[in-house]
Every structure is written in C-alpha cells, then in structure tokens.
C-alpha cells in the first residue's frame, strides 16, 4: 500500500509510476487487473473561469491515517491485493494533477468497484479544503464538494 500526500511543488508522481510499483507486488502472478484514476483541475464550470485552486488539509498525518483506513476496508470488502493513493495539496492550475489512485486485483469487476469506492470515500470522508479562485470571486468547498 502506498499513501502519500504531497505538496504541489514537491515530487511529481504519475499513474504510470503507481502501475509500475503495483506490478512489483508479490501478488502480481495472481492478478488480472489494474485500474487507475487521475483527478485533475478543471478550468471551467458553469459561470466560473478558474484562475487558481488551493487545496489544503488541517492535519496531514490524520488524513494519511484516514486514507490508510479507507484502503484497508476497501481491500477487504472487494478482495483486491494492493491500492495506492497519492493526493496533492497546495496551489494548482488547469490540468494539474490532484488525486491519483491505482488498484491491483485478481478480477476487473472487483478492482473497478474498489477504485470507485476509494475515489468517493477520499472525496467525502477526508477533510480537504478547496478554494477556487476565479474571475467571478472565491469559493470555498469543504470535504465532499
């Protein structure tokens, strides 16, 4: 399991990096699926032209522990072998990566369900604070937004 929360200006990791790591798993011989997800900054929404997004956490260590707990629950629920999560915090612009997930499992169905659940639970259960700065003003969104 890999769980990292990284400052935007620090290390850059891609979904292919996560896949390469998963393929080194001792469970690779029993695996038949790897699913990945990359969430990135959307520059336009209805009535908004984003100039910058700032993503913060009140407690980085607590967030890592929460993500690890989510991963363990999902691994058991869907019987998948490995899950890796990388979430960036800091200042971002259109197209910048924010959130990466990779799941290694025996079968595609369970692996895809695990991926979907990780995405939703991290979005709704971890205390990220998102500030969208646009020409129209500033909007703050707390966990779940």
Image (spheres, helix red, strand yellow):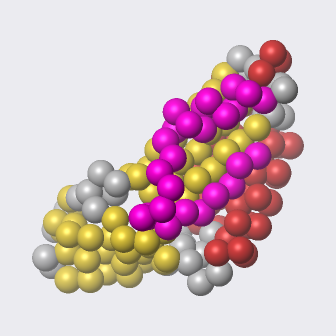
Q: Quadrant of residue 132?
A: bottom left
Is 4 magenta? The answer is yes
Q: Is residue 49 left or right of residue 62?
A: left
Image: 44 above or below 112: below
Image: 53 above or below 140: above
Residue at the location (64% across, 68% down)? 125
Whether residue 51 is visible here, answered yes or no, is yes
Find residue 111 and report its horizontal and vertical position in percent: 69, 31
Work out whether residue 70 or residue 30 is closer to the camera in this orientation and state it. 30
Q: Quadrant of residue 26?
A: top right
Find residue 33 and report its horizontal and vertical position in percent: 67, 22
Work out whether residue 135 or residue 22 is closer to the camera in this orientation and state it. 22
Residue at the location (48% across, 62% down)? 10
Residue at the location (64% across, 58% down)? 4
Residue at the location (63% across, 50% down)? 85
**Picture mark count:** 0
- Residue lying furthest front in this view? 10
Image: 134 above or below 100: below
Find residue 21 and report its horizontal and vertical position in percent: 67, 34
Whether residue 111 is visible here, answered yes or no, is no
Find residue 104 and report its horizontal and vertical position in percent: 71, 31
Q: Is residue 119 left or right of residue 83?
A: left
Task: Write down the region rendered in magenta.
Answer: 1-25
- Residue lying furthest left in this view? 135
Image: 91 above or below 19: below
């Amino acid at each position: 399991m890999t769980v990292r929360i990284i400052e935007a200006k620090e290390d850059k990791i891609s979904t292919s990096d996560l896949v390469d790591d998963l393929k080194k798993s001792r469970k690779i011989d029993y695996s038949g699926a790897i699913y990945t997800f990359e969430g990135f900054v959307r520059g336009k929404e209805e009535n908004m032209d984003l100039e910058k997004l700032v993503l913060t956490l009140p407690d980085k260590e607590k967030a890592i522990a929460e993500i690890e707990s989510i991963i363990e629950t999902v691994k058991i629920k869907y019987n998948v072998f490995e899950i890796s999560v990388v979430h960036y915090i800091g200042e971002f612009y259109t197209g910048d990566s924010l959130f990466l997930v990779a799941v290694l499992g025996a079968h595609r169905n369970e692996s895809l369900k695990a991926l979907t659940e990780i995405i939703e639970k991290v979005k709704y259960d971890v205390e990220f604070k998102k500030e969208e700065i646009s020409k129209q003003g500033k909007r703050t969104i707390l966990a779940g937004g």
